[in-house]
Image (spheres, rainbow, N blue to C red):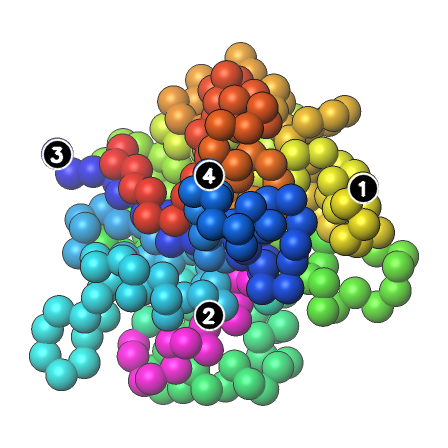
Amino acid sequence: MGKLSVAILGSAAGGGVPQWNCRCPVCSLFWAGDARVEARTQSSIAVSADNEHWVLVNASPDLRQQILNTPILHPRHGARHSPIKAVVLTNADIDHIAGLLVLRERQAFTVYATAKNHAILTQNSVFQVLASDIVERSTMVMDHPFDIGFGLRVRAFTVPGKVALFMEQSDDVRIGDVSETTIGLEVSAHGKRVVYIPGCAETNETVRDRASGADLLLYDGTTFTDDEMPKLGLSPKTARRMGHTPITGLGGSLHAFDGLSIRQKAYIHINNTNPILIDGSDERRAVEAAGWAVTRDGMMFSL
């Protein structure tokens, strides 16, 4: 029997680790050469049911480097070829759509997104470099499972979120809004199921229900505390104001999934300020003791 394979192409939030202009405690350790902090690119995964045909979930600005770092995504046949057959978008954040521009060299694949997120791509003419005669755009309907091909089945579902940062019109932003703007995904093959939620403003009962029974849950690990960035003087925005659930504190994700039948849990989309990125830190030990793994670039899951 085959396996459902999940490759972590990028495990960091927007900006990566280290962020190019950042000297937060985590980034400072990296700049100083401390081996406890690994470099991480911006979040994206690849999934496959046969290890031959791969579907990307989100297209990071670092996608070219991620492909170079991942031999299973290298071209193999003829003058032009790619194992990448589709890209599925969970939102329209820059760190999830900018990598589409890397895939502009007239290679056939399909972009799957909600109607709202397709509209965002259409409104920005730069994405027309994905030639419509060769790159198909397909609209996902919430809670309607579909076969994406190559043995993979996908179901998209809404999670609490917010509009992409570049679409915010004022400080009065609806946080936790449930719409097609921010979604999670269930990807299934060979009787196994991975639930991927890289951005979520609230770990509510609906989110818990979606994760229940998953063979692998990849969940929003952006910050350790809600006030992480304001406390460091890096931003006035809390995790929740950015549309993300902190790991700890009231409503945090650390114990939100306790009691559910989930075989493996791992944090992804981890901000450069998050101390779980420091190997051996108290925060890393705390999440591991609670049953969570901390993803890193290049990690593979075989379900």
Give the vertical position of 241 relative to 99 (above or below): above
Are there few (<14), some (14-19), or many (20+) residues within 10 Å of tag 4? few
Element on which disc 4 rests? loop
Marks 4 and 3: in contact by CB < 8 Å? Answer: no
Q: Where the N terminus falls, by quadrant? A: top left
Residue range of the region highlighted in magenta in the rendering: 95-108
Side of 266 relative to 234 (left or right): left
Say the numbered circle drawn on residue 231: 1
Element on which disc 2 rests? helix
Marks 3 and 4, the one that precedes in the sequence: 3
Give the CA distance from mark 3 to mark 4.
38 Å
User: How far across and down, in percent of the image, does residue 248 sit?
Assistant: 68, 27
Q: Amino acid at mark 1?
A: Lys
Marks 4 and 1: in contact by CB < 8 Å? Answer: no
Residue for point 37% across, 28% down: 215
Residue for point 26% across, 40% down: 4
Give the CA distance from mark 3 to mark 1.
50 Å
- Residue designated by label 4: 36
- Residue designated by label 2: 99
Give the CA distance from mark 1 to mark 4.
23 Å
Q: Amino acid at mark 4?
A: Arg
Q: Amino acid at mark 3?
A: Met
User: How far across and down, in percent of the image, does residue 301 sit?
Assistant: 30, 37
User: How far across and down, in percent of the image, does residue 23 sit?
Assistant: 65, 54
Marks 3 and 1, the one that precedes in the sequence: 3
